Amino acid sequence: MRGEVLFNTDRCKGCSLCVQACPVHILALDTTRVNAVGYNPAYCFDMSKCIACTNCATMCPDTVITVKRLDV
Ligand code: SF4
Ligand code: SF4
């Protein structure tokens, strides 16, 4: 299964729970950006490795993340 993660970036509070939850370690906080609420937002730096497990979306307390399944 391949996936694509979409972030509602301006809602992210930079808590890193999604970063820790990702089994393939492709999420990080973007220290080059500050979002609308003043945090470094989470982002995916290697989408090609996403396995659409949805761990990140499940862990996020602010429903920032949507996971799309690209194949079945
Ligand atoms: S869906 Fe799974 S593999 Fe993809 S970014 Fe989220 S936690 Fe990582
Ligand atoms: S779990 Fe949600 S709020 Fe926390 S860093 Fe990830 S996207 Fe942002």
Image (cartoon, rainbow, N blue to C red):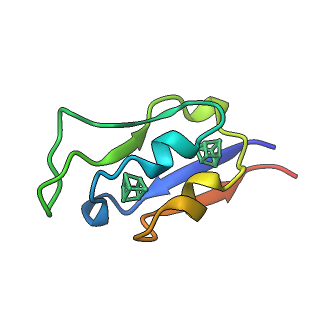
The answer to which image quadrant residue 69 occupies is bottom right
User: Horizontal placement of 58 versus 64: left or right?
Assistant: right
User: Horizontal placement of 63 versus 10: left or right?
Assistant: right
Residue placed at 22% from the left, 45% from the top?
40
Residue 46, image x, y percentages: 53, 29
**Nearer to me, 60 or 26:** 60
Residue 64, image x, y percentages: 42, 65
- On screen, residue 62 above or below 3: below
Seen as rendered, the residue at the extreme bottom is 62
Residue 21, image x, y percentages: 57, 45
- On screen, residue 70 above or below 64: above
Q: Quadrant of ligand 2?
A: bottom left
Q: Quadrant of the N terminus?
A: top right
Q: How many marks?
A: 0
Residue 48, image x, y percentages: 63, 31
The answer to which image quadrant residue 22 occupies is top right
Residue placed at 37% from the left, 63% from the top?
8
Seen as rendered, the residue at the extreme right is 72
**Nearer to me, 8 or 22:** 22
- On screen, residue 38 above or below 62: above
Residue placed at 36% from the left, 46% from the top?
42
